[in-house]
Image (cartoon, helix red, strand yellow):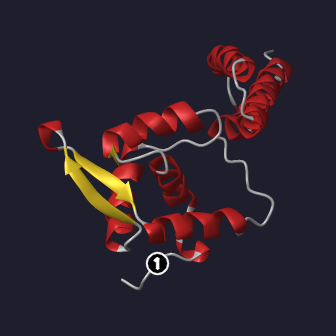
Amino acid sequence: MPPRGRASDVNATAAALLALLHTGPMTGGQLVNAAAERFGAFFSLTRSQVYRELPALTAAGLLKLGDQGPRASQQYVLTAAGKRAFRAWLTSGGGSDALRSPLVLRLLHAGSLTVRQRAELVSAGREAFSTRLASARAAARGEADPFRRAVADFAVAHNRAMVKLLDAIPLD
């Protein structure tokens, strides 16, 4: 594997893991939980993505193995090269990214569903996004850091927009 550490070599999943490891060593399970807590409103990481990325980051020298924990869990530690790669990734951002929402795609084609199917889709989506909206509002209220507050406000606006979209879908 060629040496990594340049922004072009670090994908968003890797960057998310490098960001989380700035706070200290973590196991894969701890990273999954931390990602859900910190990024859950706008960037999802699955357990399989985390466990697929960790060995690659370690092989590239961006992480090193730390202490072994209970039940053979392995901690990962951010290296100096990992910090540089993360910084390079942060500064390489080109501006926009794409929204990828299976729910929005389903809603776009909801006219192909029966009235009952469409109502169930909208109801389930509305329930999920209403719950997320309440959580996002609570997180935004308690956030003092201006960068995290801006992202928390985005999460509120995004969830509010999704509820508004779901309310606009005709059910008949």
Does residue 162 appear anywhere in the picture?
yes
User: Residue sitting at 41 percent across and 46 percent down?
Assistant: 24
- Residue for point 77% across, 22% down: 166
From the viewer's side, name the closer residue of 53 and 63.
63
Instruction: Give the position of the N terminus as an image quadrant.
Output: bottom left
Q: Amino acid at mark 1?
A: Arg
Q: Please, what secondary structure does the residue beneath circle 1 have?
A: loop
Residue 45, x across and y down, in percent: 49, 44
Describe residue 40's horizontal placement relative to residue 47 as left or right: right
Q: Nearer the viewer, residue 144 or 85?
A: 144
Asked which quadrant contains residue 151, the reply is: top right
To which quarter of the image does residue 60 belong? Answer: bottom left
- The image position of residue 101, as x and y in percent, is 66, 41
Q: Eyeballing the image, is 94 above or below 126?
A: below
Residue placed furthest toward the left = 71
The residue sitting at 15% across, 36% down in the picture is: 70
Say which quadrant the C terminus sits in. Answer: top right
Give the quarter of the image for residue 121. Answer: top right
- Specify whether residue 111 is in view: no
Say which of 56 and 74 sits in front: 74
Seen in the image, is 73 located left or right of residue 78?
left
Please tell me how crowded label 1 is: few (under 14), some (14-19), or many (20+) other residues with Cα within 10 Å: some
Q: Residue at x 36, y 38 (%)?
A: 30
Residue 65 as seen in the image, left or right of residue 46 = left
In the rendering, at what x and y percent does residue 170 appear?
83, 20
Q: Which residue is mark 1?
A: 4
